[in-house]
Amino acid sequence: MKTWSGHIYFDDKFEWSRLEKAFPDIYSLIVENKKNPEDQQFDQVLLQLNLEEMHKNKKPIGYIKDDAKYKLVFPLDRKEMIVYRGVVSDEVREKTEEIEKVLKSKKIRYTVDYDKMILYQIRKAKK
């Protein structure tokens, strides 16, 4: 089923530090392998910054590079992780399910939903 976004919700008691061990695997699912050394270095630095935030039990930065195929977004007002792609795609659901497997392997509790971004609601209303 084609979707715009996959939403992974954590409960209110969730601590961001619990995500630290799972995050490198999640990050590698989102970030495409780049041949350009500068892009690779940027991606590695961003991974480290995300891990540092989680180590302090703070919300991660995510991955929202303009030219990225997928974006990993952490909304400011809730404990949620969003996998987003700029077009409707089967791949968004697949990526979200892959992230679910990583979370399950690390025994992190969550719930999943799809297409809950405000942008999607606006586009749907225009049709």
Image: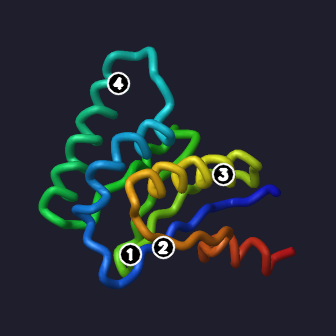
Give the residue number, with chain letter if any, for mark 3: 92
Please identify the quarter of the rendering in which residue 120 is found.
Answer: bottom right
Dot 1 alpha-carbon crowd within 10 angstroms: few under 14, some 14 to 19, many 20 or more: some
Give the residue number, with chain letter if any, for mark 2: 9
Identify the disc placed on residue 40. 4
Nearest-to-viewer mark from 1 and 4:
1
Is 84 displayed left or right of 59 in the figure? right
The mark that comes first in sequence, 2 or 4, is 2
Which residue is nearer to you in this view: 15 or 87? 15
Measure the C-alpha gap from mark 2 to mark 4: 29 Å
Give the residue number, with chain letter if any, for mark 1: 79
Q: Residue at x 42, y 74 (%)?
A: 10
Measure the C-alpha gap from mark 2 to mark 1: 6 Å
Please identify the quarter of the rendering in which residue 124 is found.
Answer: bottom right
* Residue closest to the far bottom: 12
The mark that comes first in sequence, 2 or 3, is 2
Q: What element carries label 1?
A: loop
Marks 2,1: beta carbons within 8 A: yes
Is 51 displayed left or right of 85 in the figure? left
> Which amino acid type is shown beneath numbered disc 4?
Gln
**27 lies above or below 62:** above
Q: Which colour scheme is used?
A: rainbow
Marks 2,4: beta carbons within 8 A: no
Nearest-to-viewer mark from 3 and 4:
3
Please identify the quarter of the rendering in which residue 76 is found.
Answer: bottom left
